[in-house]
Amino acid sequence: MSSRRDERIEVLRGTLDMLILKTLVLGPAHGHYIAKHIQRTTDDLLQVEHGSLYPALHRLEGKGLVSSKWAMANDRNRELRVYRLTAKGKKQLLREESRWKQLTEAIARLMWPADGREPR
Amino acid sequence: MPIFSRWWTRRTLEQRLERELRDHLALEAEDQGGDWAAAHRALGNQTRIKEDTRAEWGGVWLERLSQDVASAMRQVIRRPMLSLGVAVTLGLGIAATTTIYAVIDGVMLRRLPYEEPAALVTVGAISGTFVAPGVQDLGPVSILHYKQLRQRARVFDALVAVNTQRLMPLASPDGGETNVRAHEISDGLFGMLGTTTPALGRLFLPEEYETAQEGAVMVTFEEWHSRYGGDRGIVGRAIGRIRGGRFPAVVVGVLPPDFHPLEALFSGGERPGYYFPRAPELLPGDRGGEQWYVLGRLRRGVSNERAQSEVAGIAADVAREFPHAFGVRQGNGDPYRLGVNGLHEQTVGANAQVLRVFLGAAALLLALAVMNAATLLLARSLDRVKEFSIRMALGARRMRIVRLVICETGMLAIAGGGIGIVIAYGGVEAFVRFAPASIPRLNAVAIDGRVLAITAATSLVTGVAVGLLPALGLTRWGAWQPLQAGARSFAEPAVRTRTMLVAGQIALAIVLLAGAGLLFNSFVRMRSVDPGIDVDRIVTVTIPYKDAAAVRRLPLPQAWDRLLDELRAAPGVASAAGTSTTPFQTPFWSLRARVPGDEPDSWREGIAGYAITPDYLDTVGTRLLVGRNFHRLDGPRSERVALINESFARTHLHGADPLGLVVRLPEYDDGLRIVGVVEDVVQQRAEDGFRPAIYVPYTQYSGTAFVVAVVRTARPPETILNDLRAVSSRLVPGRQPDIRLMRDMLDSTLTAPRFRAMLIGAFAITATMLGAVGLYAAMAHFVERRHRELGIRLALGGQRGDVIRLVLERAMRLLLSGLVIGVVAALILSRALQGFLFGVEAHDIGTFVAVVITLLFVSAIASVLPARRAAAVDPITMLKAE
């Protein structure tokens, strides 16, 4: 486990916001689910520090990108604070996504030039 | 963040976050198979998460501040005596700086209360001395000079003249008359200063300056209040007589407050209460000895230097073109040189230096108060190391704790600022009351918005300074170490900080004590200077004999004889003699001389000249050391003779036998034969030291319009003042008799040095007390923290004396470094006092030894008390207490 742990990448602040929004595209979810989902889908590579999740959620709600209310969670049989993507949040996510894509493509072009071969 | 910024949502937000985190833990624990510890680890530090989340809510800065303030307030209130002590300590330091700053602001920094004051200058005759570095002493000029300046000078927008020597007979309530000071001013003064509206009535009309019939008078605002109680009916009232008593003086208006433009030239003198108009340019140029002070406004863009060179050139031209005109040449035949000073520099004069010294001393006291407060707080903060560690372990960031501590000290400093301002109000009042008259514009000194702003800033900086050391020192170990090891060992570096603070206080106290000691020493020495005359039974009566109807037309010797005879006949008078200048005042006659062996054109400058009657020396008690006194045979037609003083013999004759030598003066074609040597007499102030002087018989001198009668009284001098007044009033009707006790005159020369010594002394005493309190606090805390060790020592058979010695050794170590630093600093800083010292060097060993002994004594008391307490406690109780 320890060697695996070392490869985990701390999620950057701005990136965390985007990952949260992306998770919520699938439907409303509570904090614990969001954290687990990010971890699971990235094959545990992206380590979300649970502690940093809540400041981020509150920040997004403050910006009006998500909304929240107490509701029964689908996966658990109890009432939890459930976050939902707003229209503004959807737009923001699209913007973020395309910017991220540009960025990763630019980096990819630099790292792996046009012939598509792996760099030595 | 519109959603969260409202305060009322705060509670709900807190509850929600709390529940979210709880849910999160529960879900995680479920996933981990019921392992709550693992769930806690996965979530992380909850306090920090909450802090970070709250930070996203907005309005957080304010909330934290109010939390900090509330928490600080609890700390402050929890230990009221300590808090009060710290606030008072800071208050004392802040009061000292506020007081002195208020004085400096009023006297030096504030603009003169006139329009564009930077362009205002004084123009006058250069006396050759300087009132302050770069500010030459300027005297009045003749009417001819004033007229020529007006015609020729191109650098001035305006040029006006003021005659300050007027006295106005004022009707007094008892039906008689008293003479008051009045200034005669030329047209344009008000316009030049931008004084366009009077407080009451009107300003002078242009024609009133030229016509002599109208006795128009303006009253100063201050005089209007003090003498007339602000009576608005004063306008149009005849209050006295004017122009030699020929016309009634009718008040046309009251001047605005703070109208004292001539203060620049009379900072030490009495302020006039009245102004009346005159056109000096219409007066004949050779009229009497009238001397006019000249004020001007420079044209835009003209520098003082340019004005200076133009004025100097005009003076030289006038001397060439009017070689024989009155008032163009000095007594020695040289033409007067004219100079220009900025009105502001001239007003501040010599006071800048002494005020800077005062401010420096106040700043030292404030620094000491800060260190003192930090010491007191540190003692308490040391006990809080654990508390801070726990706070940090619970997730508080270091800055938050530093801020918390500074918040506390800030509140104490603000309280201290409040106390300081209250004390400073009293301080300013006391300063203005006791300050020597040579400090100008004291009426402008007040604690106003500017001063308060500086005080507020000082308080805040003080608060941060006091808090920073304890705060940084106590949080540097982070969360765990103090908790694991026990706070004690981690307090050591802070103890070292406190050692430095106490040493610093001792050092500052020494610097201030040394300064006060040197000034006090100087004052005592000035006072114990043998003035060369008996001051106790001597009264001076100054009579302008040219105004005395009975003798006005007589030559000087006969006039003096007649007047002195009148005084000799008064009851209670043992003897009366005449001189041209009273002691303790600027010599009326300043001369130059050549002694045998000098080149024809090399004059020895700065010699005081006195014309005296033969019985003068006996009357004032000045001893004749060698040769003979003047006698009746030294007449106008006999050989010119002179007495010299010791300083003259020492400085200019270098031990040669003076008797029979001939001294040459520019005034006389043939020289003066020295017939005797008298002891040195203080001329103006003891602090100036003795200066060379020449005495001539009054029968061979004619250069004065006054006689100063020195009267030796047979009874206590106070009892015959009324008789002397009566004689003076009979001789010169309508003149305020000018009668003074020689003792008072001597005392007035000591006002300034006494004030300096008192002020710095008050600072030094405060400093010493604070230093002692600081040392006491440090030692008391040291004893408290070593209770256990001391208890073991006692329990194992240690003697109480050993315990006391242990504590005292500790105190001595604190003291010693402070003493060394303080003495070195004092040796360096005392040079700033050089100009104020008399008879002692800036590094006077006696003073420094006395200072060190005083401090050791006070410190011994401050440290013996805690030591005795340490030794007095029962060791069993001590050990059980742990």
Image (tube, helix red, strand yellow):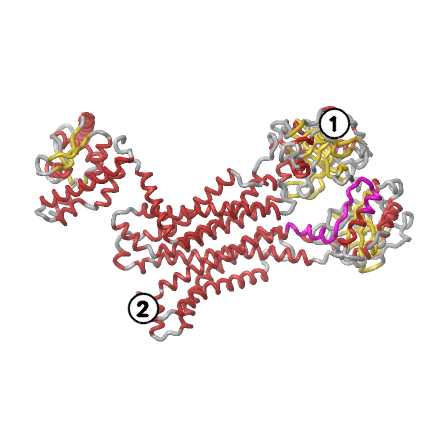
Please give the residue where the numbered disc 2 appears in the rendered image.
B879
Compared to B314, does B692 lie above or below? below
Residue B455: % across, % down: 48, 43
Task: Please tell me which residue lies in front, B38 or B831.
Answer: B38
Identify the disc placed on residue B209.
1
Residue at position x 13%, y 34% from top? A71
Q: Amino acid at mark 1?
A: Tyr
Q: Secondary structure at mark 2?
A: helix
C-alpha gap between disc 2 and disc 1:
93 Å
Compared to B220, does B680 lie above or below? below
Tell me if B52 is positioned left or right of B455 in this view: left
Q: Image quadrant for the N terminus of chain B?
A: top left
Tell me if B531 is positioned left or right of B874 in this view: right
Residue B843: % across, % down: 58, 57
Q: Is residue B593 visible?
A: no
- What chain letter is assigned to the residue under label 2? B
Residue at position x 38%, y 69% from top? B873
**Magenta residues, as a range?**
B726-752
Q: Residue furthest front?
A: B174
Residue B679: % across, % down: 77, 57
Q: Image quadrant for the C terminus of chain B?
A: bottom left
Q: Amino acid at mark 2?
A: Leu
Q: Residues within 10 Å of mark 1 (few under 14, many from 20)?
A: many
Marked residue nearer the N-terminal end (2 or 1):
1
Q: Residues within 10 Å of mark 2 (few under 14, many from 20)?
A: some
Residue B155: % across, % down: 66, 28
